[in-house]
Amino acid sequence: MPKEIDFHFKSPNDSPGYLLGQLTMLWQRKLKKVLDPLDLTQTQFVLLAALGWLSKKNKSVTQVDIANQSNADRMMVSKVLRTLEDKGFITRKEHETDTRAKTIRLTTNGEVVLQKAIIEVENADLDFFTTLDTKLSQFNKNMVLLIDQNKNE
């Protein structure tokens, strides 16, 4: 007779990790619907958005800057940026002072696609999280707290 599995949580709905996983999958499915017509994956969108955000403050954004901004693995960022370059959404040029780094910039086409994607994703977010209403601000604060507490692990 197999041994009974012992869970810390009484049910899946008591497990924050399980719930976060379920919520993430549903949210990613919603984003896929709005990003597919723009020829973007969610990861590509996140990196383009990070580049767009960083470019507002800095003219020479690097791959490392984008990885740090998005909490993403540097090798994965490199591969995704190559794909975005192939699609004509970004350019990668030698950095002016650091020969090991590349400066990443949005192309005109990349700016147009990013702006459309931002509108679509923000509308999808508003729709997805509308149930939280006045609790959305606290939800966001809790997520920031968890991100800050766990990002260096």
Image: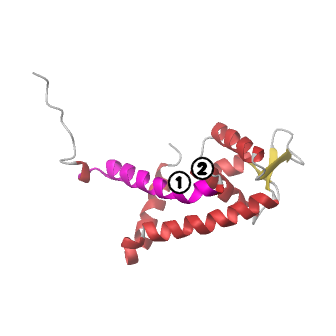
Tell me the quarter of the image containing the N terminus. top left
The residue located at (71%, 56%) in the rendering is: 51
Asked if residue 60 lies in the magenta stretch, the reply is no
Ranked by sequence position, the earlier of labels 2 and 1 is 1
Q: Residue 36 occupies which quadrant of the picture?
A: bottom right
Q: Where is residue 50 in the image (x, y as percent from the top left)?
A: 66, 57
**Which residue occupies the extreme bottom position in the image?**
134
Q: Is residue 144 above or below residue 11?
A: below
Q: Is residue 45 above or below residue 74?
A: below
- Cα separation, mark 2 vs mark 1, equals 7 Å
Q: Which mark is residue 119?
A: none
Q: What element carries label 1?
A: helix
Q: In the image, residue 5 lies at what x, y percent? A: 18, 32
The mark found on residue 32 in the picture is 1
Q: Neighbour class for label 1 at 10 Å: few (<14), some, many (≥20)?
A: some
Q: Which amino acid does label 1 sit on?
A: Lys
What residue sits right under mark 2 in the picture?
Answer: 41
Q: Residue at 46% across / 66% down in the picture? A: 140
Spot occupied by residue 110 in the image (x, y as percentages of width and height) = 75, 58
Q: Residue at x 64, y 50 (%)?
A: 44
Percent of width and height locating residue 132: 37, 72
Number of numbered labels in the structure image: 2
Q: Report the predominant secondary structure element of the magenta stretch.
A: helix
Residue 69 can be seen in this image: no
Q: Magenta segment range?
A: 14-37
Q: Do the residues labelled 2 and 1 touch (CB within 8 Å)?
A: yes
Q: What residue type is disc 2 on?
A: Thr
Whether residue 7 is situated above or below residue 36 in the rendered picture: above
